[in-house]
């Protein structure tokens, strides 16, 4: 994890294996995301991959070393789900900067992020069903949420490669850009998010995720609670003052 002022950069760092995930990598992501979530100086998290790829999914060579017990298989699946949940549960917005291939578990991690920029020519794919395995990280929901059931069925069941520009056209990511521009575009998202009130963003993350399971009366109640909690805070007063004075607000997360 690297801090750049208010921004936290998390980099998956196995470039020799194109950042293929391991249990240790998943554990590291969970730990660092929890630390970023609890750190009041961190306002935005940017998730990246070192080297040529964002993340090409499971390390298949590692999988073939030894047969896993049933408990080990479930434990491995839990690691991936914990990492995706840590992204979604993080109180700070998480932006994925996908400069190269995102395949399988790597694409699942990108789907868990709040915003994402993907390289135009990056190759993306869900290969699991052609390998006799299965997706994780809540993909059967997050993918449908992004692209709709019809497209999700196509992408999962057929497992075809597609490009970053296709992902943007389908709504799977927010933007596609030339690979060299992906870091700057992700940082531009982070800069915009830095200008928003942290407490408001945290409420938004939680409610946007929970809304799918709430009744309309309960959702409205929780929105009222969030609004009431924000009103009267120093950040609320700063937002009003900045509006009156025609300047950008300087929020403190208070």
Image: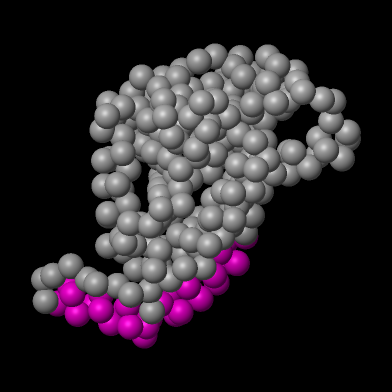
Q: Is residue 138 visible?
A: no
| Nearer the observer, 109 or 152 | 109
Overall secondary structure of the magenta section: helix
Left or right placement of residue 171 versus residue 214 in this view: left
The colour scheme applied to this rendered structure is one colour
Which residue is pictured at 65% across the width and 36% down the height? 22
Q: Residue furthest right?
A: 70
Q: Quick check: 123 above or below 214? A: above
Which residue is pictured at 18% across the width and 67% down the height? 248
Q: Residue furthest left?
A: 246
Q: Is residue 132 visible?
A: yes
Q: Residue furthest bottom?
A: 232
Q: Is 4 included in the stretch rendered in magenta?
A: no
Give residue 217's position: percent from left, percent from top.
58, 66
Give residue 94's position: percent from left, percent from top.
44, 51
Left or right placement of residue 149 versus residue 189 in this view: right
Residue 230, by quadrant, is bottom left
Highlighted range, magenta = 215-244
Which residue is pictured at 64% across the width and 26% down the height? 59
Which residue is pictured at 57% across the width and 35% down the height? 108
Quadrant that contains the C terminus: bottom left
| Nearer the observer, 209 or 179 | 179
């Amino acid at each position: 994890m690297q801090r750049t002022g208010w921004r936290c950069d998390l980099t998956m760092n196995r470039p020799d294996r194109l950042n293929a995930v391991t249990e240790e990598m998943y554990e590291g992501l969970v730990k660092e995301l929890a630390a970023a979530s609890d750190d009041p100086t961190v306002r935005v998290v940017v998730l990246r991959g070192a080297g040529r790829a964002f993340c090409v999914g499971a390390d298949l060579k590692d999988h073939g070393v030894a047969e896993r017990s049933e408990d080990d298989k479930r434990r491995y699946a839990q690691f991936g789900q914990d990492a995706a949940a840590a992204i979604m549960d993080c109180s700070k917005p998480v932006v994925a900067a996908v400069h190269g291939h995102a395949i399988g578990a790597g694409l699942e991690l990108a789907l868990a992020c709040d915003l994402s920029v993907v390289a135009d020519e990056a190759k993306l794919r869900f290969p699991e069903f052609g390998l006799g395995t299965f997706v994780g990280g809540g993909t059967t929901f997050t993918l449908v949420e992004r692209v709709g059931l019809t497209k999700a069925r196509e992408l999962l069941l057929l497992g075809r490669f597609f490009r970053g520009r296709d992902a943007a056209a389908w709504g799977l990511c927010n933007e596609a850009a030339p690979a060299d521009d992906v870091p700057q575009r992700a940082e531009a998202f982070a800069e915009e998010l830095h200008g928003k009130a942290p407490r408001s963003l945290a409420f938004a993350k939680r409610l946007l995720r929970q809304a799918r399971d709430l009744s309309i009366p309960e959702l409205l109640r929780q929105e009222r609670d969030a609004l009431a909690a924000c009103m009267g805070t120093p950040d609320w007063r700063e937002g009003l003052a900045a509006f009156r004075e025609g300047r950008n607000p300087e929020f403190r997360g208070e």
